[in-house]
Amino acid sequence: MTDEARARDFETLDGAALEAFAAEHAVTPPPALRARVFDAVAREQRTHRAQRRLRRWRAAATGLAAAAALFAAVAVREHTQSRENAALVAALEHSGSEFLSKLAAQEREIVSRGQALRVHAEVIQILSSPRVRSVRLDATAGHAGAARVLFDPDTGAIALVGAGLPPPEPGKAYELWALRGDAPPERSGEFAIDAERRNFALRLSGVSAPHQVTGFAITLESTPGAARPGGPIVLTGAVGG
């Protein structure tokens, strides 16, 4: 028999001997001791279960706290992002409003310059007529300014250039009238003066039968568009004067 086999036999004999010894000397414990042992085991089991529940509660509480912290962080971020988005939208709206205002101002300036260029072109066209007539208008007593009427005796086209006329009061306007001796004045156009640009060049509506015109006058009217002059004469001049 080998040493390894001999050792296994000894182990088997030792185990059997211990079991036989335990069975021979086994003693039933007293009921009180048995109860205390079972109580101790039960308390240990309850303690173990309570500890496991406590660990689960702690884990759950830790998870809830982490979730709450994450939710709070997300809420703060969303609130901050919302404020940033609102600020960005407000800035864009403000920039857009400024841009539209500037664009509208540029459009008005373009329209104004276009109108001025058109008027200048019409004045040049009248001046290019070989028979153009020029009538100087001087200020009457108590008034200021000077002007010159350019008109084509063939077509009746009229241009008015001048300077120094004060801007009319609100609701009033200047009117140019064509004069023919004793005949009633003929309304030839209404115009206003810019407070910042008191020099002016205007293309007015014109006159009929221009070869009969003997002079021109400018009045300041409280009811613009009337068929007859009712305001004071501020400038006047005669053809050939």
Image (cartoon, helix red, strand yellow):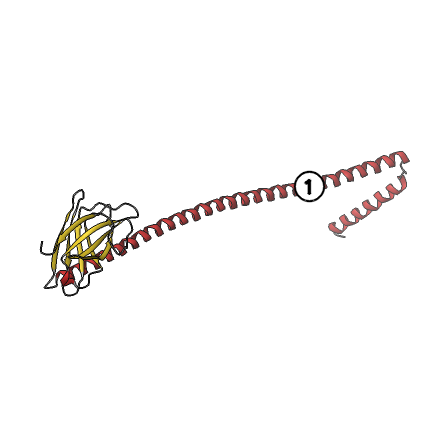
Quadrant position of residue 128: bottom left
**Does 212 sit above or below residue 83?**
below
Q: Assign a secondary structure to mark 1.
A: helix
Residue at the spot x=90%, y=36% of the render? 31
Q: Which residue is at 43% across, 47% downward?
A: 90
100 or 76, nearer to the observer = 100
Q: Is residue 237 visible?
A: yes
Rendering coords of residue 195 (x, y %): 24, 45
Residue labelled with disc 1: 57
Q: Amino acid at mark 1?
A: Trp
Say few, some or many: other residues with alpha carbon within 10 Å of mark 1 (under 14 / 14 to 19 / 20 or more). few
Q: Position of residue 57 (x, y in %)?
A: 69, 41
Which is nearer the eye, 190 or 163?
Answer: 190
Q: Is residue 205 left or right of residue 78?
A: left
* x and y percentages locating residue 183 in the rendered image: 18, 58
Residue at the limit of the structure toward the bottom, as seen here:
154
- Is 119 or 60 nearer to us in this picture? 119
**x then y, percent, for residue 19:** 85, 44
